[in-house]
Each structure stands twice: as C-alpha cells, then as structure tokens.
Image: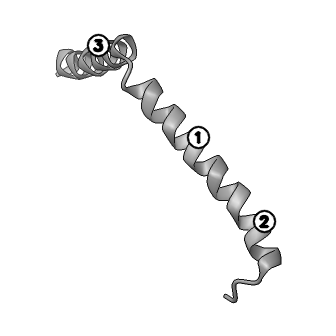
Amino acid sequence: MPFFPQFLGVLVPYLELLVVVKQSLVRLFLSTPILTLFFTLVVGNVEMKWLRF
C-alpha cells in the first residue's frame, strides 16, 4: 500500500485515537477496585461451577 500524503493525513489521527483508547483501558483495568471486583467475580464463578458437581 503506497503511503501518499493524503493517506497519512487520514491514518495519523486514527492511530492517535487508538493510542488514547489503549491508554484509557490500561488505566481502567489497573485500578485496584476494578481488579478486586473482577477477581471476586471470577472466583465466585469458579466456586459456582464446583458447587454444581
């Protein structure tokens, strides 16, 4: 795919958006309360699976 200036003008803002979204998600999932909640949900789900057997 050739990299013409018009193409780069469209590609660069898109890549910047991807970087911002990725950084936001990393901050969200590194939050201690969210990790605690996620861990609690996973453990609860595993315990419920064991109770069925």
Q: Secondary structure at mark 1?
A: helix
* Mark 3 → mark 1, Cα distance in angstroms: 26 Å
Q: Secondary structure at mark 2?
A: helix
Which residue is identified by label 1? 21
Rendered image: mark on residue 40: 3
For residue 25, side relative to residue 41 (left or right)? right
* Mark 2 → mark 1, Cα distance in angstroms: 17 Å
3 to 51, vertically: above or below: below
Residue under the image location 38 percent in, 18 percent down = 31
Quadrant of the rendering where the N terminus is positioned: bottom right
- Report the front residue among 32 and 9: 9
Residue under the image location 66 percent in, 48 percent down = 17
Residue 30 picture location, percent across and down? 36, 25
- Report the front residue among 13 and 1: 13
- Report the front residue among 1 and 38: 1
* Quadrant hosting residue 5: bottom right
What amino acid type should be assigned to the residue bearing mark 2? Val
- The extreme bottom residue here reads 2
5 to 47, vertically: above or below: below
Rendered image: mark on residue 34: none
What amino acid type should be assigned to the residue bearing mark 3? Thr
Residue 40 picture location, percent across and down? 29, 13
For residue 49, side relative to residue 13 (left or right)? left
Disc 2 crowd, CA 10 A, few/some/many (<14, 14-19, 20+)? few
The disc, 3 or 2, on the residue closer to the chain's N-terminal end is 2
Quadrant of the rendering where the C terminus is positioned: top left
Q: Secondary structure at mark 3?
A: helix
* Quadrant hosting residue 4: bottom right
The disc, 3 or 1, on the residue closer to the chain's N-terminal end is 1
Which residue is identified by label 2? 10
Disc 3 crowd, CA 10 A, few/some/many (<14, 14-19, 20+)? few
